[in-house]
Amino acid sequence: MVPDRVTRAYRFGPPGALIAPDGAMPFWWLYLAFDPDTTVWEARFCQNDLTRPGTFYIDQGAERDGLIATLRFPRPLRLWNLNSDASSKLGIADMLSSPDHEWCQWFGVRLHDAIGLCANASRPDGIVYPSRRHRGRAAIILSSAALESMRAEVRQEHMRFVDHDAYGRLAGDPLLVLPPLASDVPPR
């Protein structure tokens, strides 16, 4: 569950301009959440179909292959918090929730650089930010450098998404619909 590297840069980058031709990245982020429900939405196990407002569906790939991991770190994580007034004071609240990934990826470069300027004893491991996909909840990006320093001591458990309580709650939700173009799937 704890990757040695990633092959795709997501919301906080790095941007394509900094990724080497062989796919090597100068840094990367591990995306986490404080709770399984936010994990499900951030990982896009659940999504919304814009043609059917007021509903959601569970991704078939997530049902087939999805895992929910619980990670226990060897010490409390040191996190900068961009939720609530911090992002408002910085003037970035709207951009953090924007679908403009390019801005966020370059902002991720700035966060990475700022973290690197901190003394080792107080250096943040990552950032808490407002979840774009599960409003009102927080998500975390954990620096690849911080992860590397703790990797050997991270305890991890994982469970198939379909066996997790979060799936059970979602599968019984009255707003759940079939995925788009899933006419070959029997109704729930």
Image (cartoon, rainbow, N blue to C red):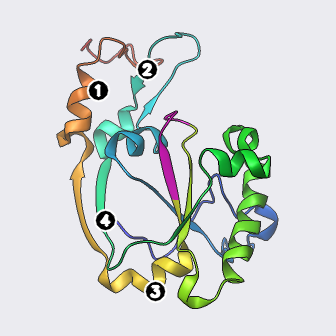
Q: Earlier in the sequence, mark 2 or mark 1?
A: 2
- From the image, tell me which residue sits under label 2: 56
Residue 112: percent from left, percent from top? 69, 72
Depth check: give the residue in front, 81 or 175.
Answer: 81
User: Which amino acid is tagged 4?
Assistant: Leu
Q: Is residue 181 left or right of residue 24?
A: left
Task: Give the mark nearer the N terminus: 1 vs 4.
Answer: 4
- In 3D space, how far apart are the residues under numbered discs 2 and 1 (Cα atoms)? 9 Å
The numbered mark at residue 146 is: none
Q: In the image, what residue occupies the spot 69% across and 77% down?
A: 26
> Dots 1 and 3: beta carbons under 8 Å?
no
**Callout 2 secondary element:** loop
Q: Amino acid at mark 2?
A: Phe
Q: Earlier in the sequence, mark 1 or mark 3?
A: 3
Measured in 3D between alpha carbons, the distance from the residue under mark 2 to the one under mark 4, in whole angstroms, is: 27 Å
How many residues crowd around disc 4 within 10 Å: few (fewer than 14), some, or many (20 or more)? some
Name the mark on residue 170: 1
- CA neighbours of label 2 inside 10 A, class few (<14), some (14 to 19), many (20+): many
Which residue in the protein does label 4 denote?
71
Quadrant in the picture for the C terminus: top left
| Residue 178: percent from left, percent from top | 37, 16
